[in-house]
Image (cartoon, rainbow, N blue to C red):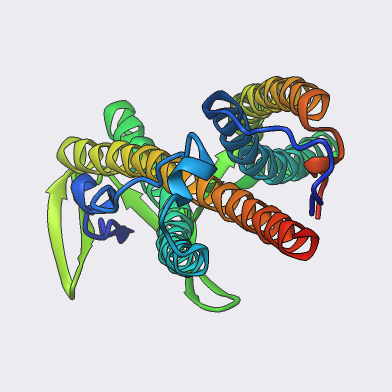
Amino acid sequence: MASEGASSSSVASPSESGGMSVPKAEFIDDVAAFLEGKDADRILAQLQENLRTYRMIVEDLVQKRVRTLQKLPELQRAVEIVKHLIEKQESGEATVTDFQLADGVYAKAKIASAKTVNLWLGAGVMLEYGLEEALTLLQENEANCRANLKTNEESTAYIKDSITTTEVSISRIYNHDLERRRKAKESGGNS
Amino acid sequence: MAKAQAHVEVLAEDQQRINAFSRLHMKMQELERKLASEKRYLEELEDASNELMLSDDDNVRFLVGECLVHFEKDTAEGRLEEVTKEAKDSSEKTAADLVDVKKQLADLKAHLYAKFGTQINLEEE
């Protein structure tokens, strides 16, 4: 009688969403000094390469974020119904519900004093929990989910900064190189 | 972009401003999406509340989690009010955040344009 499948997939460890293993793009203080004795084209190619890497990481982070954002409401709904069951159990009332058998097919069910729910833990495993226990677990998962979103946001900001810095560096080096060539041409033409 | 016209050097602090601008711009887009969906939800709740007021059926099916739970009308009204309040608070917070982010963006924009003029483009591409 007392069955309510609540989904709660595995909780990603916060460390892996870090993406902090990538070195941050450094700001170039003085382009002229930086380029001294270096081949501008090679530097530009290197920066483009970095940019590609950063963009891939951001793409990855964004996808993770979308997945987590989808999981959050699922957990919230699970928390909501378990809370409801706890309330009903405390007041000793039964819950009458129309539950879905198939798309568009509903049956009426009466859940009288449910003491346990079964939580879908993922990977083909479902476990029976006491109501309070289930609520704690679901709320923990919800908190983890939010924490993940926060680290994800920080990582994204970090990589995003590197992208912007690299883009600016590329255009500064490019402009500087252009200017240098122009000057070289002028002085070459004059002498 | 910028040709060699009265070239303005980019300083580390400018770079930081540009980074902040780019980050905030991303945040703004996310907040706008969030606000739009929260507003849609609020409208739906309002519709539900109107329907509930008009209905004379005492037995209402109310979505709790993913289940349609039968409630008496009064209970349903109470719950709906609670849910609406939560949704309202949340969307008001989002709106306030958005105003804040937009203000920061405007400040940064003014600052960066003042320094770089036509050498920088901060408009929506």
Q: Nearer the viewer, residue A141 or A43?
A: A43
Using residue B9 as the reference point, say whether residue A74 is left or right of it.
left
Using residue B76 as the reference point, say whether residue B54 is left or right of it.
right
The N terminus of chain A lies in quadrant: bottom left
Q: Nearer the viewer, residue A100 or A183?
A: A183
Whole-percent x, y for residue A97 in the image: 47, 54
Is the residue A126 above or below the residue B14 in the image? Answer: below
Name the residue located 46 percent from the left edge and 61 percent from the top edge. Answer: A47
Is the residue A66 above or below the residue B13 in the image? Answer: below
Q: Nearer the viewer, residue B112 or B51?
A: B112
Is the residue B7 above or below the residue A187 in the image? Answer: above
Using residue A175 as the reference point, say whether residue B71 is left or right of it.
left
Whole-percent x, y for residue B34 in the image: 65, 42
Name the residue located 42 percent from the left edge and 66 percent from the top edge. Answer: A46
Whole-percent x, y for residue A93 in the image: 36, 36
Is the residue A143 above or below the residue B110 in the image? Answer: below
Residue A105 falls in image quadrant: bottom right
Name the residue located 37 percent from the left edge and 39 percent from the top edge. Answer: A146
Whole-percent x, y for residue B11 in the image: 58, 28
Using residue A47 as the reference point, say whether residue B87 is left or right of it.
right
User: How many badges with numbers are in the image?
Assistant: 0
Name the residue located 65 percent from the left edge and 33 percent from the top edge. Answer: B9
Determine if residue B55 is in view.
no
Residue A80 falls in image quadrant: top left
Q: Nearer the viewer, residue B108 or A109?
A: B108
Determine if residue A36 is in view.
yes
